[in-house]
Each structure stands twice: as C-alpha cells, then as structure tokens.
Image (cartoon, rainbow, N blue to C red):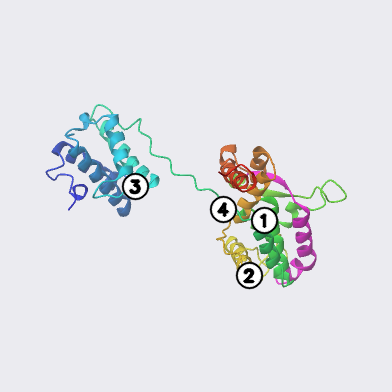
Amino acid sequence: MTLAEQPPDARDAPRPLARALRTYLDHLGVERGLAANTLSSYRRDLRRYLAWLAAQGVERLDDVREDTVTGFLMALREGDPDHPPLGAGSAARTVVAVRGFHRFALREGLTAVDPSAGVRPPAPAKRLPKALPLADVERILEAAGAPGTALALRDRALLELLYGTGARISEAVGLDVDDLDLDGPDPDGQAAQVLLRGKGGKERLVPVGSFARAAVEAYLVRGRGALASTRGGVPALFLNARGGRLSRQSAWTVLVRAAERAGVSAEVSPHTLRHSFATHLLDGGADVRVVQELLGHASVTTTQVYTLVTVDRLREVYATAHPRALG
C-alpha cells in the first residue's frame, strides 16, 4: 500500500487532519448528497493530500500555508515514484477538492485561515479546433450530392449551408423555410441571408454565399417537395425521409457518410465544417471580430482560438516558402 492509499487516520496522517477530513467527507456524503463515484474521487484525492502533508511534517490545518498547497500542486504535476505526473485537468480536479476541504474547515471553525484561497487550478491546455483543408471540404460537398436524389439534394444543401455560414448543426436543423431570404434586399440575390438562432436564443443574420444558395435552391425546387409529400404542414427547412424535421444526430450522420464516400480520412464531427469555415475565413484575411459575429460568439476570446491555427499555418508556409527560412 502506497503512502497516498493509506486511510486518513493511519500513522502517517496526523489525527487532527484525519478528523477534519472525516468530517468533510461526512458533510459531502450526508448533507450535500454527492454521488458515490464523486465522493470516492474526493476521498482518493484528499487522502493523497493528507499523505503529502504528513510527509512535509504538517500536523494541523493551521500549519498549512499557501506555499504548502502550491507545493502539493507542483508535486501533482511532477509525479513521484508511486504516482505518474498528472495532466492539467486531473491536477485541477484534485486542487478543487483541496480548496473545498479548506473552505469547509474555515467555515466550521476548524482553522483560522484558508491557505488555498489564492491557489488557482492549472488551466487545461487549449484544444485547437480541427479544420479540414479546402480540398477535403469540396470533396465532401460533392460526395453528399452525388446521386441527385431528393435526399442527396438535401444533404448537399445542408452541408453547403453549414460550411457557407458557419452554423452549428443544431442551428441548421432548427431552421424553417421562412428563416431563409435567398433573394435578399438586392434583386440579383447577391445579399442572400439566413436567420440563425444560437445559444440562449440569440439570433443573428448571416450571409449565404452563392454555392450554398444554389444548393439550397436546388433542394427547395427538386427535393424538399418530394420529402414533404409524406407529411404536410411541416415548416422545417431540412426534412427526413418521413417528412419530419431532420434531427441533429441524422445531420451528423449525413456529414460522416459524405466524408467516407469522399475518401476523407480525417475525423469529422458536428463542428468540423464550422471550424473549417472560421479557419478559412481567417486564412483569407477576415478580421477576427467579423468572424466572431458570424459564429455568434459572445466574446472575441472564444473566436481567438482559431487565430492559433492560422499562426501555425503561417509558420508552415513561411518555413517551406521563404528562401532563408531554414538553415
């Protein structure tokens, strides 16, 4: 049994700390009613914390300082012979448990200070969105509409609209026919637009490009009527084979199957075309705040994750194209 696996009242865990931990765990289980799995995670993380405190010679909660808690966080990230290093997410979870323990102890009068108040859990590494190369997007779009059936026309229109507007799949399947303005204020149709309803019911008008407009028009003229004949009066733009509104899961399947038929080996997900939309706009010189508005992000900070992708692309192009980039 390793040090961190010993129960909190073992010889390596001083009794005052062990009693405080038992009181806190009882509070979590009885008063807060945490699920068994969650409570088990807290118990495991805090036993490791108590074992580490004991190894530092800390015997009372009042002996814990902010640098003590910070030292424990560093130990989590570095690992030891009995424990592999923890990633930012796992270390953050453990620090959250430690902070909860100290807040409870302060509130219950078990200690005079909360030494963990100034310790922040490590931020998890940003996961960069996965964007497809333009050539792969075009192959997927072509594959979606290849058979020319009513369903194929729908699939091509759906994917063209997703990539052409940056809409979330949930926003696209939530569209009604009346949400589209394919003619726009200009008689030549160059200002076609769609009304998207995003998170929290926020609405935004997004331009519809010529390829997406042509695909949607083809679907409306030659495809939707055949699908709608099985059930009248459904306002949804994208219909399933039974004439009802297309579901989010079915829309995801449309994308995955089109990627398979196109021979695109990269992993695709509901957000793949949205990510590609944003990345390709920024690669083409679009301002990040314009992309923010098109995506419906509340904060430009959310959109700026895409700039990391384009910076990597710039470095790649520079390294391969500039005559003096490489030694």
Tag 3–tag 2 contact (CB < 8 Å): no
Q: Residue 213: where, in percent of width, then height?
A: 77, 56
Q: Residue drawn at (31%, 43%), measured in percent from left and top?
A: 78
Magenta region: 202-230
Q: What's the mark number on residue 130?
A: 4
Give the structural element (helix, strand or loop) at label 2: helix
Residue kind at label 2, given as amino acid type:
Arg
**Residue 299 visible in image:** no
Q: Going from the N terminus, do you reach mark 2 or mark 4 first? A: 4
Tag 2–tag 4 contact (CB < 8 Å): no
Q: Going from the N terminus, do you reach mark 3 or mark 1 first? A: 3
For disc 3, the marked residue is 86
Question: How many angstroms separate mark 2 from mark 1 (CA)?
Answer: 17 Å
When asked about the image quadrant of residue 249, the answer is: bottom right
When asked about the image quadrant of residue 308, the answer is: top right
Question: How many angstroms separate mark 3 from mark 2 (CA)?
Answer: 40 Å
Question: How many angstroms separate mark 3 from mark 1 (CA)?
Answer: 37 Å
For disc 2, the marked residue is 261
Residue kind at label 1, given as amino acid type:
Leu
Q: Looking at the picture, does residue 160 appear above or below residue 18?
A: below
Residue kind at label 3, given as amino acid type:
Leu
User: Residue 257 versus residue 222: which sits nearer the camera?
Assistant: 257
Q: Going from the N terminus, do you reach mark 4 or mark 3 first? A: 3
Tag 2–tag 1 contact (CB < 8 Å): no
